[in-house]
Image (tube, rainbow, N blue to C red):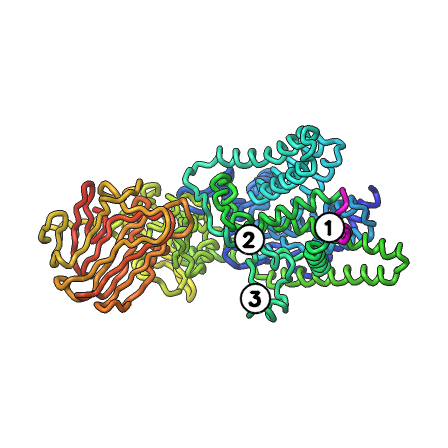
């Protein structure tokens, strides 16, 4: 054991030197480097650093003002940041060095995986020198290091090897109570770092449980106690993490159906084909060799050749009665349970069986679909299969030597280690490319940014929060605004240096109602901004980058008073009365116009009544109703909302078609709405997919979808909508410049805006 300890220290020194050579400036000036300036990376830096500097408790108040968000849902390393906060409050001030702490923590917890990998290989009777070399290869080939470009908590490679090693020790049956406690503690630490880590832990133990139940299928009565014990230590951390988060969460409408479950999964190419492979460029035009980067976990050339050999042998055995040729691949009893469990987990990471007609299983196990990146579960297979490959190669090496083929054995070993080392070297070089970016966002010194306020003789404390343009936000993968993230980047920088929180958030797990109310801030003046009810009377700091803005953004910017600008950004004062005054002004103008409209029953207008189409879907079946007594509802498939031949009484010209669409949380994305126009002969004259994702006009969880179309007599107007859980109400077609009042049983609408 003492020799193992010396070997581990030696290996960790080597790993540190490798990283030092690749990332020397990080070790020298850790707070001066950003590993990436991309959106995910900046969010991670900001969430961690802002909390460390200004917040405490479980609430992050730097985003989603005035509500904040739970630490567990925003990639802010909830448990670790509490520990660092304790150090800052009681031992040494570190609050201004969040970037440095994250940068060094990622490297440290990556290297800390090395002792566990080494001990696992030693457990499988591999010699110390060989286990040491392979440990370094497995570590530096790890797909987790590639996450250093944005998904910072995923770089913490220590957790999976630690789970596996503790499980090995538990499996041996000695001191099971001790190893059970260590397993649960490790899973809790991982779970309060990222929910994925407790999921990795649970699925690893479940995989082992399934394999062992199969192995004991003839005598389950002898295994049930052990199986129950294993099941208990598998689910306890999951229950604790989920239970504590749910008990402390003040939000009840978080998204449960994120985008990505059927997209961000693995396939065999993402495991056995290296990134940037020449094979992809050669065969890519003939065979689909694409795979999602989330599923990438390349195991290296020796492991890939072993997998191919196993596949060919297995295929060959299908046509032979004797199966002896397969025995050479049979794993030793020490590793076979983990080997077969990792294969089951690999299938899960490939979205099997869900994508092959078994999606109904997600209704039975709803928490499973919350993992938008199934491909990450390949990491379990990566560590197990590379360890199995190392064991197999050494076993083959020993076998060749006993067959008196020492030269062949040595060549095999040198070839395997050499090519594997090349793969690891290429991976670490590729993963560290572009990491040394200057930290010009979250510097420890605030003076550069605060000088802007001093120059303008403005105190940041006079503002309550920051709103940025161009607008960027998301709402549970339903509504999405990301045409430019430069304003978001500048706003995070301003927030970090001033302490002013951001109104917007780019978290896909944010409360639906809160996400919608921030998007609604850019709605037309006809819609009251509900978020203002929970804000004070201080003005908002408007941070704008000098990019092209849409009409809504330009209007808001014009309402603000610029007090500082350079060639990149403007800082402006936006009083809240701008929203209230514009809303009141719109209503007063509507009240003045209504009296001049000619009434035709439920519709009053200033144009010919025959040029107006309205459908309140009062015979619909939707449980969620926008106005009146009913709304249109479709469970799934494509539906025709409108198929109308324009008669001769219709005026020729430009028309607006609008309707209200419910933001249903049961599915990610928004329904696809298609607008078509056909001439008298049936030829399609116009087609447009309507915008249902970047919409600001929001009212009570519904969005107003609209577009313009040219119509004339004898044309046919069609509106199709396709998706699951579609609820539509108040479909209105009117001349573009017409004024139309629609009276429903419980509310009136002017130009399809609620009064």
- Residue projecting furthest to the right: 404
Q: Would you place residue 233 above or below residue 309 in this image? A: above
Which of the 4 quarters of the picture holds residue 195? Answer: top right
Give the spatial CA distance, label 3 vs label 2: 19 Å
Q: Which residue is located at x 24 percent, y 61 percent?
A: 717
First in sequence, mark 3 or 2: give its number. 2
Tell me the number on the disc at residue 387: 1
| Left or right relative to 706: residue 492 | right
Q: Secondary structure at mark 2?
A: loop
- Please give left or right for residue 368 compared with residue 209 in the image: left
> Can residue 37 be seen?
yes
* Residue 35, percent from left and from top: 58, 58
Q: Earlier in the sequence, mark 1 or mark 2?
A: 2
Report helix, strand or loop for mark 1: helix
**Location of residue 457 by image quarter:** bottom left
Range covered by the magenta-colored residues: 322-333
Residue 325 counted in the magenta span: yes
* N-terminal label among 1 and 3: 3
Q: Residue 516, percent across and down? A: 36, 47
Nearest-to-viewer mark from 3 and 2: 3
Q: Report, in whole angstroms, how far the alpha carbon at label 1 lies from the one at label 3.
A: 31 Å
Which sits in the foreground, 629 or 12?
629
Residue 265: numbered disc:
2
Q: Can you tell which mark lies on residue 287?
A: 3
Taking the view exactly as shown, the residue that stands out farthest to the front is 321
Which is in the foreground here, disc 1 or disc 3? Answer: 3
């Amino acid at each position: 054991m003492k020799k193992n300890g010396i070997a581990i220290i030696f290996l960790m020194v080597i790993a540190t030197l490798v990283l030092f050579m690749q990332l020397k400036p990080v070790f020298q000036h850790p707070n001066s480097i950003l590993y990436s300036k991309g959106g995910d990376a900046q969010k991670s830096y900001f969430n961690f650093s802002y909390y460390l500097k200004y917040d405490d408790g479980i609430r992050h108040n730097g985003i989603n003002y005035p509500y904040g968000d739970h630490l567990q849902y925003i990639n802010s390393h909830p448990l670790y940041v509490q520990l660092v906060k304790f150090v800052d409050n009681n031992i040494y001030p570190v609050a201004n060095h969040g970037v440095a702490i994250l940068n060094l923590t990622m490297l440290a917890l990556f290297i800390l995986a090395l002792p566990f990998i080494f001990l696992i290989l030693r457990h499988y009777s591999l010699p110390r020198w060989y286990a040491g070399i392979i440990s370094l290869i497995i570590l530096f080939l790890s797909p987790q290091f590639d996450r250093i470009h944005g998904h910072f908590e995923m770089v913490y490679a220590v957790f999976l090897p630690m789970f596996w090693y503790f499980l090995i020790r538990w499996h041996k049956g000695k001191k099971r109570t001790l190893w059970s406690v260590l397993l649960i503690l490790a899973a809790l630490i991982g779970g309060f770092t990222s929910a994925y880590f407790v999921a990795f832990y649970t699925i690893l133990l479940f995989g082992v449980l399934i394999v062992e139940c199969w192995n004991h299928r003839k005598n389950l009565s002898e295994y049930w106690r052990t199986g129950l014990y294993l099941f208990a230590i598998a689910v306890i951390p999951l229950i604790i993490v989920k239970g504590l988060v749910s008990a402390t969460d003040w939000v009840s409408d978080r998204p449960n159906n994120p985008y990505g479950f059927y997209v961000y999964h693995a396939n065999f190419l993402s495991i056995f084909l290296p990134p940037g492979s020449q094979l992809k460029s050669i065969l890519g035009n003939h065979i689909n060799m694409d795979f999602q980067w989330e599923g990438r976990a390349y195991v290296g050339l020796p492991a890939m050749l072993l997998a191919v050999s196993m596949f060919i042998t297995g295929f060959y055995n299908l046509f032979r009665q004797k199966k002896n040729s397969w025995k050479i691949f049979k794993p030793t009893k020490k590793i076979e349970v983990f080997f077969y469990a990792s294969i089951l987990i690999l299938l899960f990471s490939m979205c099997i069986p869900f994508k092959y007609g078994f999606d109904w299983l997600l209704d039975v196990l709803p928490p499973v679909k919350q993992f938008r990146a199934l491909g990450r579960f390949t990491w379990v297979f990566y560590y197990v299969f590379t360890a199995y490959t190392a064991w197999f190669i050494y076993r083959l090496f020993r076998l060749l030597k006993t067959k008196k083929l020492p030269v062949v054995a040595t060549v095999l070993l040198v070839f395997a280690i050499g090519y594997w080392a090349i793969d690891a070297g290429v991976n670490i070089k590729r993963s560290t490319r572009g990491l040394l970016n200057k930290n010009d966002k979250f510097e420890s010194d605030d003076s550069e940014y605060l000088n802007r306020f001093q120059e303008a003789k403005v105190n940041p404390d006079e503002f309550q929060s920051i709103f940025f343009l161009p607008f960027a936000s998301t709402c549970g993968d339903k509504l999405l605004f990301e045409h430019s993230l430069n304003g978001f980047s500048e706003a995070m920088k301003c927030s970090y240096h001033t302490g002013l929180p951001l109104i917007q958030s780019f978290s896909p797990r944010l409360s639906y109602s809160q996400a919608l109310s921030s998007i609604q801030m850019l709605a037309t003046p006809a819609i009251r901004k509900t978020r203002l009810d929970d804000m004070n009377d201080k003005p908002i700091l408007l941070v704008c980058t000098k990019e092209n803005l849409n009409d809504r953004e330009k209007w808001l910017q014009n309402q603000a008073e610029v007090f500082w600008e350079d060639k990149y950004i403007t800082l402006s004062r936006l009083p809240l009365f701008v929203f209230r005054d514009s809303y009141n002004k719109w209503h007063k103008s509507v009240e003045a116009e209504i009296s001049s409209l000619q009434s035709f029953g439920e519709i009053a207008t200033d144009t010919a009544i025959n040029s107006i189409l309205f459908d309140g879907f009062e015979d619909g079946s939707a449980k969620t109703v926008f106005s009146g007594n009913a709304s249109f509802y479709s469970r799934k498939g494509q539906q025709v909302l409108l198929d109308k031949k324009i008669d001769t009484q219709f005026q020729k010209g430009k028309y607006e078609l609008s309707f209200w669409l419910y933001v249903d949380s049961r599915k990610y994305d928004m329904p696809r709405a298609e607008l078509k126009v056909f001439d008298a002969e049936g030829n399609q004259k116009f087609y447009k997919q309507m915008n249902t994702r970047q919409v600001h006009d929001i009212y009570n969880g519904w969005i107003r979808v609209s577009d313009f179309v040219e119509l004339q007599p004898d044309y046919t107007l069609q509106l199709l909508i396709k998706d699951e859980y579609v609820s539509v109400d108040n479909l209105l077609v009117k001349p573009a410049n017409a004024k139309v009042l629609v009276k429903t049983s419980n509310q009136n609408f002017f130009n399809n805006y609620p009064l």
